[in-house]
Image (cartoon, rainbow, N blue to C red):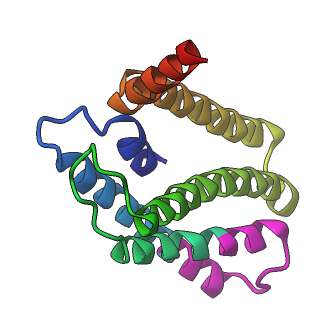
Amino acid sequence: PIGVLIPMSFRNAFDDKAMWYKIHQVFQMTGVVLMIVGTIVMIVYSSAHFNSMHKILGFIVFIIAILQPLNALCRPKHSGDENEAKSSSRYLWELLHKNGGRLVIVLAWANVYLGIKLLKSWHAASPVLTGVLASVQGTVIAILTVVAILQYGKSEHYSKDHDKSSTNSAEA
């Protein structure tokens, strides 16, 4: 989730305008590597594959997450001129890449919750442990959501979108 927050909320927080992209890449590739390791562990140590919603959803998240960096390799070039309209291929690519990333985050959080529930049913984990894990997950989601919203509100993207909608409202 941190890799998604970087372009969404901290794009303009760095003096070096390319820095946000480098940090985004590092976090995203770290996440993909950890996901590959987790999938390998699941395949090696699990006697039954895809016999629960947690495993099925995990595989779906895995596939979409693996496709994201491959999608990034196909990114159409942007002119760099903010006043120039994006090409339709660039617009569609951004739509797919951004929403694919958002979908992975939502599905991954849901899958973590399913995994916590499995701890309780499969491994007789105590209700206190699973409650703490679920609370930590909920707290992290809440904090990341608040940070994203606050940072997005400070961003140039929000200002431009807000100014456009205010202008359009005033003209109506």
Taking the magenta stretch, the answer to whether it contains residue 100 is no
Residue 96 percent location from the top left of the image: 54, 64
From the viewer's perspective, is residue 147 above or below residue 72?
A: above
The C terminus: image quadrant: top right
Residue 42 percent location from the top left of the image: 63, 78
Q: Is residue 71 left or right of residue 171?
A: left
Q: How many numbered marks, from 0 up? A: 0
Taking the magenta stretch, the answer to whether it contains residue 49 is yes
Residue most toward the front? Answer: 171
Residue 121 lies in what quarter of the image?
Answer: bottom right
Q: Residue at x 80, y 60 (%)?
A: 123
Q: Is residue 66 left or right of residue 85?
A: right
Q: Residue at x 59, y 77 (%)?
A: 63
Q: Main secondary structure of the magenta part?
A: helix
User: Camera-side residue: 107 or 10?
Assistant: 10
Residue 13 percent location from the top left of the image: 24, 32
- Magenta stretch? 37-60
Residue 108 lies in what quarter of the image?
Answer: bottom right
From the viewer's perspective, is residue 101 above or below residue 164?
A: below
User: Camera-side residue: 68 or 40?
Assistant: 68
Residue 80 percent location from the top left of the image: 21, 53
Q: Is residue 54 left or right of residue 91?
A: right
Q: Residue at x 60, y 36 (%)?
A: 141
Q: Is residue 26 left or right of residue 49?
A: left
User: Camera-side residue: 133 or 88?
Assistant: 88
Q: Residue at x 21, y 49 (%)?
A: 81
User: Camera-side residue: 115 or 59?
Assistant: 59
